[in-house]
């Protein structure tokens, strides 16, 4: 049930306490785990592990680690020590007598030093550094997230969409440490943070500050620092329409989106025109490295336009035909179906088929697929950041304020893995993310009678059910 392992020790302790009290039913686990958040797994695998305690089947943990590295784009350990807190996270391995550097908060007048293009406050301990920096506790706001770019003109017979700023919400804040003259500890010790720590300044700052002070230096982000300074999914405003045999996509984004090489979806020619624009008065950092960035946006628009035009065709994936198969450059592929309950409006089931070549380890591949599906549901339905349009200040600074779907509200997610003899293929969970996001948008269009034009789609019944 574990992926990076950062949240799992707390989950293990809470579950052990519930089990010791004989409270092992699903409502009991819902209450016990309400204090925790696992961004990686989407929770279903955690519940499965707690309820069924695994099959006891022998696993190839080297193959499992290899699959995790292929999905997370960074080395990752898999083993019993990981959920017990021994995964080697950067800040866990730092000497306790090291100097500690934290970023200078906005509006602070503390003495600071420049390193890696940022202002840092240095102290003898984490508490000392934070006190010197004047750190205050993060907050959440009652203001709803709203797309920063206005909707484009709706093409006749087509679709349009505007998305909000979204926090990747990896749970382990950026951290590193370095001895003078040595290389800094990696902030990616056990997972890729969905691409969120690519380009993090903490490693370069640790090296520079260690050289300057002649001592070991830890560089540590608080949650508020991650939100203010870390990468965000680039917001978009775009439209798509099928014109003859040509899918025409026109849009703009705050920050670059790395669109994948153009295929011919459903046999149609793909014509993409895109503009990169700057955010007004915003210090937020759009990042093209986040999970399925560019791929998901393009897939959602294309699949929406094909659904609107009634021109959906199927292609084989495994032993069955599937609508809207999503391919990634590695050759991995995925398809998804999302059902919404007719009377309640809740998302009551997500089905995913994923082809990743040799799975290497079904447990890890399934867990990554479920985690990607959970994140895709959140992107479409519930997740966003409230950002002041004039100052660019983020109003949502706590992990609970990002709109992440709660464990008890995650719908059942079934994953079918296509068994293959070919080489293992990378980034299949990116394909899952894109497929589930597009399937959710199309399911909303059918259930609501009209297609929501903004993410998160807060006005839909499905969104309200998941934000209880």
Image: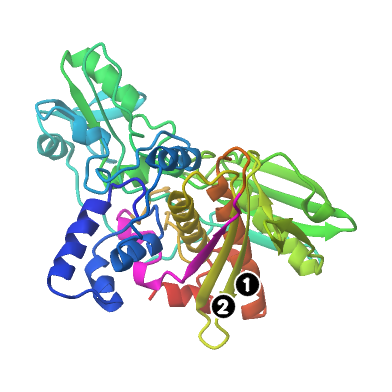
What's the CA distance linking mark 2 and mark 1? 7 Å
- Identify the residue shown where x is 80% and y is 52%: 248
Give the answer, above or below, for where 183 lies relative to 324. above
Residue 118, quarter of the rendered image: top left
Q: Position of residue 305 (x, y in %)?
A: 75, 62
Q: Nearer the viewer, residue 116 or 323?
A: 323
Check the image and name the residue furthest to the bottom.
343
- Residue holding disc 2: 340
Q: Position of residue 95 (x, y in %)?
A: 14, 27
Q: Nearer the viewer, residue 229 or 77?
A: 77
- Identify the residue shown where x is 46% and y is 51%: 368
- Identify the residue shown where x is 13% and y is 25%: 98
Q: Would residue 66 be counted in the magenta stretch?
A: no
Q: Please report contact status of discs 2 and 1: CB closer than 8 Å, yes or no.
A: yes
Q: Would residue 408 be counted in the magenta stretch?
A: yes
Upstream in the sequence, badge 2 or badge 1? 2
Residue 116, quarter of the rendered image: top left
- State left or right for residue 1 relative to residue 361: left
Q: Which residues are magenta?
A: 397-419
Disc 2 on helix, strand or loop?
strand
- Residue holding disc 1: 443
Q: Residue 296: in sight, yes or no?
A: yes
Mark 1: give few (<14), some (14-19) or many (20+) Cα within 10 Å. some
């Amino acid at each position: 049930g574990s992926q990076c392992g950062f949240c799992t020790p707390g989950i293990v302790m809470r579950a052990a306490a519930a089990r010791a009290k004989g409270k092992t039913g699903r409502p009991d686990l819902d209450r016990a785990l309400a204090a925790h958040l696992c961004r990686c797994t989407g929770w279903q695998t955690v519940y499965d592990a707690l309820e069924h305690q695994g099959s006891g089947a022998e696993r190839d943990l080297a193959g499992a680690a290899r699959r995790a590295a292929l999905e997370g784009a960074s080395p990752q350990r898999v083993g019993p020590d990981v959920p017990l807190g021994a995964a080697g996270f950067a800040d866990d391995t730092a000497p306790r007598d090291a100097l500690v550097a934290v970023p200078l908060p906005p509006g602070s007048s503390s003495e600071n030093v420049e390193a890696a293009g940022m202002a840092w406050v240095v102290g003898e301990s984490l508490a000392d550094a934070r006190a010197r920096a004047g750190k205050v506790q993060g907050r959440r706001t009652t203001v709803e997230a709203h797309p920063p770019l206005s909707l484009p003109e709706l093409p006749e017979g087509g679709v349009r969409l505007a998305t909000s700023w979204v926090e990747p919400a990896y749970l382990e804040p950026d951290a590193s440490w370095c001895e003078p003259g040595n290389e800094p500890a990696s902030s990616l010790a056990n997972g890729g943070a969905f691409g969120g720590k690519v380009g993090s300044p903490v490693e370069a700052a640790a090296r520079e500050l260690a050289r300057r002070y002649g001592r070991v230096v830890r560089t540590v982000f608080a949650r508020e620092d991650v939100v203010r300074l870390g990468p965000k999914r680039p917001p978009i405003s775009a439209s798509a329409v099928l014109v003859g045999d040509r899918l025409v996509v026109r849009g703009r984004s705050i920050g670059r989106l790395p669109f994948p090489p153009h295929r011919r979806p459903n046999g149609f020619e793909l014509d993409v025109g895109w503009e990169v624009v700057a955010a007004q008065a915003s210090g937020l950092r759009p990042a093209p490295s986040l999970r399925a960035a560019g791929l998901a946006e393009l897939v959602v628009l294309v699949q929406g336009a094909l659904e609107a035009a009634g021109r959906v065709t199927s292609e084989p994936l495994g032993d069955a035909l599937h609508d809207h198969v999503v391919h990634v450059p590695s050759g991995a592929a995925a398809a998804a179906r999302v059902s919404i309950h007719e009377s309640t409006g809740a998302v009551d089931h997500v089905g995913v088929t994923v082809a990743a070549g040799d799975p290497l380890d079904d447990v890890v591949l399934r867990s990554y697929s479920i985690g990607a599906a959970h994140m895709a549901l959140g992107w479409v339905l519930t997740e966003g950041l409230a950002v002041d349009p004039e100052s660019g200040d983020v109003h949502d600074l706590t992990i609970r304020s990002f709109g992440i779907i709660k464990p008890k509200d995650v719908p059942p997610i079934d994953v079918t893995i296509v068994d293959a003899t070919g080489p293992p293929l990378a980034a299949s969970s990116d394909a899952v993310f894109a497929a589930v996001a597009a399937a959710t948008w199309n399911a909303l269009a059918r259930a609501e009678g009209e297609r929501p034009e903004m993410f998160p789609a807060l006005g839909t019944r499905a969104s309200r059910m998941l934000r209880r």
